[in-house]
Amino acid sequence: MIQYLLFRLLRWTIGLTLVTFFTYAMMFYGAGDPIKRMFIDSENFDSADPAVLEALQAKYGLDKPFLVQFTNYIGNLLRGDWGRSIRLSVDRPVWDIIKFRLPVSMQLGFAATVLAAVFGITLGILAALHHNRWLDRVIISTVIFVTAIPAFVTAPMLLFFLVLVVKVMNVPYGWNGLFHKDVILPVVVIALGPLPIIVRQTRSAVLEVMSQLYIRTARAKGLPEYRVVLGHMLRPVLTPLITTLGLQMITLINGSLFVELVFNIPGFGLLTAEGIRSVDYPIIMAVAIIGTLIIFLSNFFVDLVYPLLDPRLRYT
Amino acid sequence: MNQAAKQGTMDEFGVQTRLSRNLWQTAFRRFRKNWLAVFGLIIIILFLLAAIFGPILAPYDFLEQDLTSMLQGPSALHWLGTDDLGRDTFSRLLYGARTAALVAFSTTAISLVIGVIVGTWAGLQGGRVDEVLMWISDLVQAVPGLLLVMLINSALRRPIINWFDQLYEQTRNSFYLNTSWLDFVLVFSALAMIGWPGFARLIRGQVLSISKEDYVLAARALGSKEGRVMFSHVVPNSLGPLIVAVTASMGGAVVLEAGLSFLGLGVQPPNASWGTMLSNSLKLWQSFPHLLIGPAVTIGLIQVAFVFLGDGLNDALDPRRN
């Protein structure tokens, strides 16, 4: 078991290093020098003082060859220095920005996961208990229908409906903490992302469990239905869901990008979009590394927790 | 238990005649019964027709700016109204369909080719090669997809533009100056980069599992030639999941293209893209909601159609379903 986890850890470390390397290479060879682009974008490139440009390049270490730059970056990173933002928020340490942006997205993501899990599991169980009857069909089709629509369409459409048609709310804008009412709509939209997989998986897991003998025993000894469901069905259903939730981190990260953009929430996703638009090396690097790390860690966490939840896997 | 008993008797009597029916006929019959899937198919066909015949159907040129009729609501002249530059929304949606369809087909084609090569190679070779190839595709899938697409997109844009400038300097061929289709190429390649691992995994799995199936063994034992085994057993049996995956990939490409354009990183104006239209409408939606409704409903409808179609195909093409 420990050997297996160590092996996976090693693979992910190599993977993360590769991701870092390729991101840096793509930035260096593809997107080009951010300082130079800043000068070009300001449209007085020809009249600009080359000395200023070179001084700025030297300041951010952009005048050195690729491998030197990359090694420096890794070296600094290992010492906990993420570099300084070049264009987005000039000269501010990247970690300072991340420190404010990441928790916002994490809170959104966490709230969305909880919401999606609660609703998804409930709907999944309901659908399974009414297997192939109308409630099952309605739940499954509605969930497919609603969640097929991407977040950047759902969010504006909900805004349109709730603000202009029903007029129950003002346009939520920005970040006012997790317990402000402006959070409701963004969280709901993000939660729609992983919902269909949770519903389907719960449904098929419950269907499988229902035919088990211990469920029949539970029913036979006269347990009320809710105790059969909560006491005997829920646990085997939850176990595979942990994996799904872990793997759904990608949808959460992708989804929150658009949602943060639409609702102007200063989170990690918005930072990603802004960083890439302004070709801000250190920001892009940090966002790519942290984004990948989150997914790796959630996968690792799944591997770690899974045997604890499913005793059948413990000794293999 | 009841079901098992039923199947046992049917294997001996009823099923034999039913199975002799062509796989595709059975699939079609099953598909036709699923009205949600049929609805999806109709929407997709309409979408493809709009993509092909859009320019003929469009009442206005999608670039035509009519500054006397800006930001109008829906009317007989402009069915879905006009945007802030006086361009007809309906015409732009039709041209956007062309963009979306182009991206969907090219992205899927590129990722399918890469996926088939990698998948069959990994599946047939096995061992180390298989392990490394699958690890690479795992790695690609582990990076947040949108981030990777945005990275590739912004990394490739400048070198390609520079390259074309150089080509123009050398050849003086004005073809290299027109870079409006460059966005398309960029979007295709970036999207294909995150699309291929899915196909590779699927095809590897199919190669591995089907070549071990009893019916393949039986066919070989009966003395079928390798080519016949391949084309009458392996290919038809792996085609079902592949068709479903292709449908999903096209839907995914449409939504990612719209998403990229929404972020301002996809197909650049003046080319029409649903994503760009949507993000433009966000500045004005409170006063002019019709700008939002058009592209939003279109993207939503196409996505729903793709999902229902994929689901229907999945059910219809699964040979184990009765």
Image: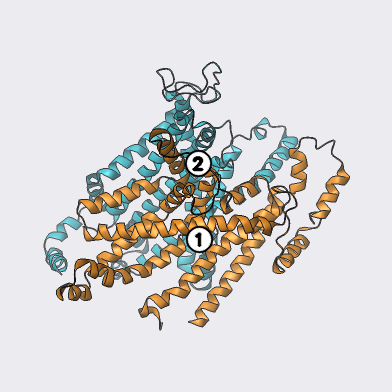
Chain colours: A orange, B cyan
Q: Where is A38 relative to A19, above or below?
A: above
Residue A81, percent from left and from top: 72, 64
Q: Residue at x 18, y 72 (%)?
A: A223
Q: Residue B296, how many percent across, how many down? A: 44, 37
The correct choice, above or below, for B253 with respect to A114 in the image is: above
Q: Which of the 4 quarters of the picture holds residue A163? A: top left
What residue would you read off at disc 1? B118
Residues packed near mark 1 inside 10 Å, few (<14), some (14 to 19) or many (20 plus): many
**Dot 2 corresponds to which residue?**
B258
**As drawn, is A238 to the left or to the right of B10?**
right
Element at label 1: helix
Q: Callout 2, which amino acid? A: Ala
Could you say which is closer to the camera, residue A36 or residue B25?
A: A36
Alpha-carbon span between mark 1 and mark 2: 28 Å
Q: Disc number at residue A264? A: none
Residue at image x 85%, y 50%?
A55
* Badge count: 2
Residue B176 visible to an observer of this rendering: yes
- Residue A155: percent from the left, percent from the top? 45, 43
Indicate the chain on which mark 1 is placed. B
Mark 1 vs 2: CB contact within 8 A: no
Q: Is residue A229 left or right of residue A121?
A: left
